[in-house]
Image (spheres, rainbow, N blue to C red):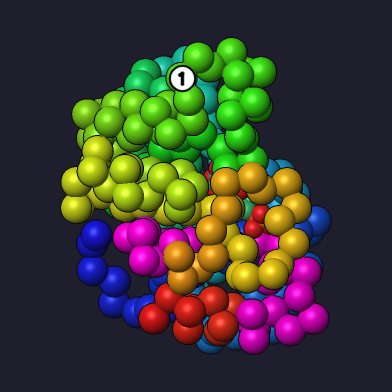
Amino acid sequence: MPALQDPRDRLIVALDLADVAAAEALVERIGDAATFYKIGYRLGYAGGLEFAARLARRGLKTFLDLKLHDIGNTVEEGVRSLAGHGATYLTVHAYPQTMRAALRGAAGSGLKILAVTVLTSYDESDAREAGYALPVPELVALRARQAAEAGIDGIVCSAVEAISVRREIGPDRLIVTPGIRPAGADLGDQKRVMTPGEARAAGIDHVVVGRPITGAADPRAVAQAIVAEMA
Ligand SMILES: O=C(O)c1cc(=O)[nH]c(=O)n1[C@@H]1O[C@H](COP(=O)(O)O)[C@@H](O)[C@H]1O
């Protein structure tokens, strides 16, 4: 896996909050315990893109989790529009046409494209219901292989699949894993789950953690404990 400068960068905090004021307050409370923040649908559609650009200007790392998937031209131009936000990562769904278009849109900008394989809220029956015939581990491996062939920067998958994904993508591409829960934490709607320590042992580059931090009485302490568990 690519070398990290700062162990705190292993944790990406998902700012799944209702508005920018709440996100700003959480970032202040967490302080220097976290260096990397993810802005997804909820905050992104509530002013979060401009907020993400502000975080980046302050020297924090940002991840725009917009999970793009559309015709190639729309994806390519959409990524081009996002490339000026100072973000480190942007997600698209791991469909070959979509990934190739996103990489064209990001070319030369420094923005890295991550491909979401199979959502961590899916188990076998959810995948079957959505029309996929392959078992989830095989579907994740296929998408990881196709992502590597497209030249993707990194993969989003469950840490449960990290070892097999690493085999598909080699040592230099990133593995980013949501569906992370400290031992004993509420799973919510996550189904393919590991602890931060298990994920790290499986060779991930970053974990993404939302509700266990955003809903904690002491978010800074939870963030510190997660980083320590992965040291
Ligand atoms: O792309 C993602 O970040 C993502 C992919 C995936 O398969 N599963 C997943 O949970 N996520 C995101 O990761 C975050 C997980 O949040 P918590 O379940 O609250 O820790 C959410 O913002 C999800 O949108």
Which residue is labeled 1 in the image? 134
The x, y position of residue 214, in whole percent, is 72, 68
The kind of secondary structure element at disc 1 is: loop
Residue 59 in view: no
Q: Residue at x 39, y 28 (%)?
A: 138
Residue stretch rendered in magenta on the structure: 199-222
Q: Quadrant of the N terminus?
A: bottom left
**Above or below 183: residue 109:** above
Which residue type carries mark 1?
A: Leu
Residue 185 lies in the magenta stretch:
no
Instruction: Identify which residue, 222 or 97, lies in the foreground.
Output: 222
Instruction: Identify which residue, 130 or 54, lies in the foreground.
Output: 130
Q: Residue at x 46, y 49 (%)?
A: 160
Image quadrant assignment for residue 105: top left
208 with respect to 175 (left or right): right
Instruction: Identify which residue, 206 or 37, lies in the foreground.
Output: 206
Q: Residue at x 43, y 34 (%)?
A: 137
**Above or below 112: residue 185:** below
Instruction: Identify which residue, 78 or 94, lies in the foreground.
Output: 94
**Above or below 47: residue 144:** above
The x, y position of residue 109, in whole percent, is 31, 47
Q: Quadrant of the C terminus?
A: bottom left
29 with respect to 64 (left or right): right
87 with respect to 142 (left or right): right
The x, y position of residue 13, in whole percent, is 58, 66
Image quadrant assignment for residue 76: top left
190 with respect to 52 (left or right): right
